[in-house]
Image: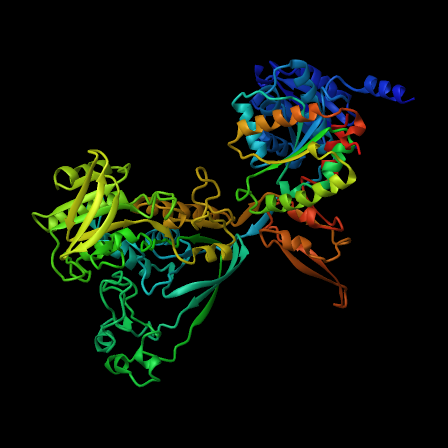
Amino acid sequence: MEDKDVKKEEHKAPKHGGDNSSDPRIIAFVCNWCTYSGADLAGTSRMKYSDNVRVIKLPCTGRIDPLFIVEAFKKGAKGVLVSGCHPGDCHYTSGNYHSRRKYATFRDLLGYLGVDLDRVEFSWVSASEGNKWVSIINEFTDKIKSLPGKSTDIFTKK
Amino acid sequence: MSRIGVFVCWCGSNIAGTVDVEKVREEAAKIPGVVSALDYKYMCSDPGQNSLRNIIKEKNLTGIVLAACSPHMHENTFRKAAAKEGLNPYFVEIANIREQVSWVHEDKERATAKAVDLMKMMVEKVKRDRPIEDVRVPLNKKALVIGGGIAGIQAALDIANGGVEVILVEKEPSIGGRMIQLDETFPTLDCSSCIMTPKMVEANQHPNIKLYTYSEVEDISGYIGNFKVKIKKKARSVVEKDCTGCGECWNACPMHKNVKSEFNVNLSERTAIYVPFPQAVPLVPVLDRSVCLHFKKGGKCQKCYDACGPKCINFDLQDEIIEETVGAIVASTGYDLMDTSMYGEYGYGKYKDVISGLQFERLLSASGPTEGVIKRPSDGKTPQTIVFVQCVGSRDPEKGVPYCSKVCCMYTAKHAKLFAHKVHGSQSYVFYIDIRSTSKGYEEFVRGTMEQDGAIYLRGRVSKIYEDEGKLIVKGADTLSGNQVEIAADMVVLATGVIPKKGSDKLAQMLGISYDKYGFFTESHPKLRPAESSTAGIFLAGMAQGPRDIPESVVSGSAAASKILGLFSKNEYEVEGTIANVNEATCVACFYCQRVCAYNAISKKEIKDRSGKLIKVVANVNPGLCTGCGACVNACFSKSIDVKGFMDDQIYAEIKALAV
């Protein structure tokens, strides 16, 4: 029964972003001003990075509802990245501080729920750090690939 | 029912080289709600935009998605094109398949798959877009300039000459700021008072400028176009309109010793009732109540009152609070000098003849304590040898500040030059780290000081200064020759680092503008918006932003003024409509949103029924203040607040579109 399900899922899964550890779907929630611009800079500088990531742009990391992260996992993401302006550089003065505080508490809750905390990452990427964006995406993707890949495996085995 | 058009741009081969644009178009056409899908070589070109506009019209589109370059590039272009066809410009969404797909990935199949995903996300988002109207805020066409130094005066004059009323607030008894303290200015050696005083007088007499000296901004609320300002006019004890500036009062004042003159940087004394300097604007004295015998000894002394002809001295005057409404503000609060007493090895504060650069300016100045004759503070003798030490406090991350004060190289060269001009046969030595002389005529000026005026420049630091038989022995290193040097000097002048004006951080908090870790106000963008603060309607000028010289301060004052005149050339200020919106029906008035709002944009609103009975209190967003950051959305427990353009359902739809 279990095997059949897995087969069915494999059949359903598109070639990219599929349900296996070799091609995990990664969703990045980024702020418009720093990280989104940093990612654009990586583009204009023609840097190359892993194509597993899908970016969702928001005005500010302060806008990122923790439930977005839960939703992303529910919809099959194997890793979720949150990235915004460096502390002190928030376009909106303090949105990234709210986000950081919220994230600190929320991370604990995710852990309590049993989510493998290796799958959520928080980072600061400024508009001038195209190279940092590239290395964060590459490293995070490699890390996610090294983790077990089945859909239920966002949870740690206890 | 949505009628979405998807436009896939090739961007020549920039996108089409790595992304199968036809595949993206085909996938788009399969999505329910998409009625038109098209790919084109250059969507941003005129023909591209025209085809977009034609299809909006033909297919009566309710939303469009462009799979193209970054929204930071052409979002506005396409929004404008859509608006021309009567479509709400916020019904345009961009899937960034160039900067974040074709330029960063190499595998065409996988890049195409990603492009399709991003396009799908945006289709789902645009389906849930609501029309957004840009907000128009009415403007009170009056400006406030805080700080009456050269930058503030320039800003005030430019705004006033543009036909707009200006309120100029200065903390000190006179306008003029630091510049009026200077003697001659580099690199032209024109006298500071000669070029500054006419500007000060012009500012005072300008019909569009209302001048408040000896006054401070006490409170500011509101937002662009509508700032409510409270100005505290400190009690001067002199009725300004009656005073003739004759000087009988300060000549009669018995307190002519023991009170140091702030203007002369403690090199002379002043009376309790005083004008800081003879060319003060306005030429109306201030009675310093903290030292006046009348106030200290219970009203016995009133010699100034007796001496005053027009009887304009009034001991009973009180601080006054003046309220004004302005549409824009310039913050030009200037700078202070660092306290350098922590450099024990230099002996500032310990040896009388170790002075700061600003003190040396006062010694050079014809209106200064020595009437322009350079004299040692200790014994009044004219020095023959002066050692100048550059970078005292600046460029010193350990004890001082890491940044460069920018003006010290030049004013030290000027000091050495003027010293050579005034005391023939004298010798000056300059200890420097680097010489920074990058503006027009600056390098030549420094060269002249070295070559014509014979100043000896030593590259290195001073390790110790001590007094020995009336001389100051300066020990230092000359790193170019590798020798230790010892100079017996008559006087030492320290080029002291600059820091933001005391209290400017408090002002920044009051204004709601950001400042860096040193306290300098930060620009909205360091390169592209150097005259604007992070808060709409508040502009910056002068040294309050960071070290700069006089021409740069003048430029920044004019820049702030032209920004304000530009702003005031319209009757209303347009704000992007992507701001927070409260659902009053579900709001429970917890006001967590108010706590997280960095812009004080949320206030309490009372909802009353027809008879005037209070039904409930809800959060209310001030569109002039809200920037649409969305921090309030996440703080809201009852999900009653949302940011237009980034609504919860849109984000969830985007995530859903990415489901695997």
Give the x, y percent position of residue A148: 75, 25
Is the image coloured rainbow, by chain, by secondary structure, or in one colour?
A: rainbow
With respect to residue A117, does B329 lie above or below? below
| Residue occupying the point 41% across, 57% down | B146
> Where residue B39 appears, x then y in whole percent?
66, 18
Is residue B419 shown left or right of residue B94? left
**Left or right placement of residue B504 versus residue B390 in this view:** right
Which image quarter is the N terminus of chain B in? top right
Q: Which is nearer the eye, B75 or B83? A: B75
**Looking at the image, which is closer to me, A145 or B32?**
A145
Using the image, determine if residue B401 lies above or below residue A143. Answer: below
Question: Residue A2: which quarter of the image?
Answer: top right
Task: Between residue B443 and residue A149, name the one nearer to us.
Answer: A149
- Image quadrant in which the C terminus of chain B is located: top right
Position of residue B451 in the picture relative to residue B313 (left or right): left
Q: How many marks?
A: 0
Instruction: Specify whether residue B193 is in view.
Output: no
Residue occupying the far right of the picture: A1
Q: Name the residue at the left extreme.
A: B425
Relative image position of residue B454 (x, y in whole percent): 12, 41
Picture quadrant where residue A53 is located: top right
Q: Is B432 left or right of B600, judged from the image as shown?
A: left
Question: In the rendered image of this protein, does residue A107 appear above or below residue B294?
Answer: above
- Measured as percent of width and height from the top left, residue A130 is found at 54, 28
Q: Is residue B333 visible?
A: yes
